[in-house]
């Protein structure tokens, strides 16, 4: 088999017909205000490896072009919706992913950066979007971060210092969003479409079979059987109870809870890191892919990160040290930007995290086995999402079984099985 067909997503091996020099030339001409701009060469390749993402189709392009000022080259990332028929298109075609991400790049994040800068903090929260459209097709184009020295971590564990860096950036983002929610509650009203607003979330077999597969696995291991009745009890209604948690800001808001504009998909492949070329010291981390960003409890990104971002040693402690570091940056940023609302307490944050336990149940039963199988190269992401038998296998890989053996006693100690 050709190497390219195993390393990249199949729908990214060949760009669509409309993605050509004429299309890119028109965009660059407008962006650079150069009517005479002409693209002389355009090279297009897949933008990411298998497992990096699923909720879009991405290409990396290098455009060679001329203007009245000379010859130039611009590296680009092009993001669009899947056009090939199949599970991916069915899952995404009726979603709000592109509207959400365009709103993040063009509305929310520029304002967040402005607020930080006004307070003397020059943290960069996003890479500028140079073009976006919803019709006749959904497209977003960015300058490529790779030539700027950013890279995605794929072939090694993420370090504690790298995790601290991305949690610091998330904390600043969350803090500014709290200020905006408090002072201008309608400014972010468009961000109401997260993972649980996906049209197929309650019918996709990946979601609907997850808890059943998990319970079946628990029955296979003697040490896990005592936990089986807890999950059997919630099997038929835990998704409904989870949706109540996820919709809390919009429908069931509480005065004793804290809410933010979350990232929504806070995992390693949605982060790019930059290091000093001479010393190797880390210089920056850039968050990308804001398609699931929405207004929700402050706990959503944090709980998600425990299972989808952290290494096992952090996950087995429920991310305590990293989340406490995040909390310190959150509170410091709230003070720096002049937040006038109720500031979270560390104990209060943990109480809210543990209260929203149904998200943990989704993570451990459905998303964690997929993530670990893909990360360890035991499965491709499309297999985990589309192949029932392949998906079942992910529940018996050693790394997942080990994680379950550490997490279930932690759940019990935290009282997650009480009052189910």
Image (cartoon, rainbow, N blue to C red):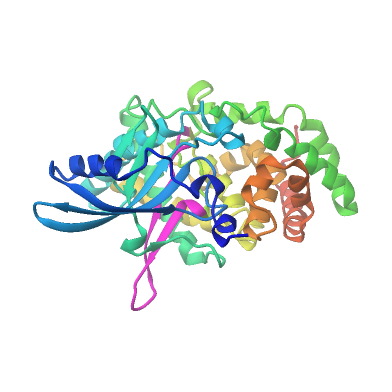
Write the residue at 64% across / 31% down: 242
Is 280 colored magenta in this rendering?
yes
Q: Which of 252 and 238 is in front in this view?
A: 238
Task: Say above or below: 315 vs 299.
Answer: below
- In the image, the segment drawn in magenta is 269-295
Residue ranking furthest to the left = 68
Write the residue at 75% across / 32% down: 419
Left or right: residue 184 compared with residue 226: left
Quadrant of res 309:
bottom right
Task: Say above or below: 223 vs 194.
Answer: below
Q: Which of 363 and 346 is in front in this view?
A: 363
Left or right: residue 255 compared with residue 370: left
Residue 175 is situated, as x and y percent measured from the top left of the image, at: 38, 43
Residue 365 is situated, as x and y percent measured from the top left of the image, at: 72, 43
The C terminus: image quadrant: top right
Residue 209 seen anywhere in this rendered image of the structure: yes
Residue 108 is situated, as x and y percent measured from the top left of the image, at: 33, 36
Residue ranking furthest to the right = 222
Quadrant of res 122:
bottom left
Residue 340 is situated, as x and y percent measured from the top left of the image, at: 32, 36
Residue 123 seen anywhere in this rendered image of the structure: no
Write the residue at 49% across / 47% down: 12
Write the residue at 75% across / 41% down: 388
């Amino acid at each position: 088999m050709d190497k390219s067909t195993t390393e990249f997503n199949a729908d990214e091996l060949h760009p669509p017909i409309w993605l050509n020099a004429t299309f890119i030339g028109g965009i660059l001409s407008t962006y650079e205000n150069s009517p005479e701009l002409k693209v002389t060469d355009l090279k297009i390749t897949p933008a990411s490896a298998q497992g990096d993402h699923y909720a879009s189709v991405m290409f990396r392009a290098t455009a060679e072009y001329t203007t009245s000022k000379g010859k130039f080259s611009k590296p680009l990332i092009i993001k669009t919706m899947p056009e090939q028929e199949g599970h991916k298109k069915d899952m995404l075609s009726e979603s709000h992913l592109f509207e959400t991400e365009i709103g993040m790049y063009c509305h929310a994040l520029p304002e967040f950066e402005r607020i930080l800068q006004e307070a003397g903090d020059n943290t960069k929260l996003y890479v500028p979007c140079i073009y976006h459209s919803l019709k006749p097709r959904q497209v977003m184009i960015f300058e490529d971060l790779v030539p700027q020295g950013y890279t995605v971590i794929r072939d090694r564990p993420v370090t504690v210092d790298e995790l601290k860096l991305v949690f610091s950036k998330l904390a600043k983002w969350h803090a500014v969003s709290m200020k905006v929610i408090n002072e201008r509650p309608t400014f972010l009203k468009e961000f109401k479409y997260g993972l649980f607003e996906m049209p197929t979330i309650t019918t996709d077999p990946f979601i609907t079979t997850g808890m059943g597969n998990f319970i079946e696995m628990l029955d296979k291991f003697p040490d896990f059987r005592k936990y089986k009745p807890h999950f059997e009890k919630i099997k038929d209604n835990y998704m409904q109870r989870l949706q109540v948690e996820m919709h809390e800001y919009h429908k069931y808001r509480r005065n004793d809870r804290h809410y933010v504009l979350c990232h929504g998909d806070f995992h390693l492949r949605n982060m790019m890191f930059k290091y000093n070329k001479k010393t190797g010291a880390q210089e920056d981390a850039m968050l990308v892919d804001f398609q699931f960003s929405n207004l929700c409890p402050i706990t959503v990104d944090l709980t998600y990160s425990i299972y989808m971002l952290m290494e096992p040693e952090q996950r087995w402690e429920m991310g305590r040290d990293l989340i406490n570091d995040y909390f310190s940056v959150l509170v410091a940023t709230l003070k720096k930007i002049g937040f006038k609302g109720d500031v979270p307490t560390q104990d209060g944050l943990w109480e809210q995290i543990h209260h929203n336990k149904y998200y943990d149940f989704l993570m451990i039963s459905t998303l964690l086995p997929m993530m670990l199988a893909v990360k360890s190269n035991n499965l491709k992401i499309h297999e985990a999402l589309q192949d029932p038998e392949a998906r079942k296998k992910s529940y018996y890989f050693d790394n997942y079984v080990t994680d379950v053996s550490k997490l279930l006693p932690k759940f019990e100690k935290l009282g997650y099985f009480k009052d189910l």
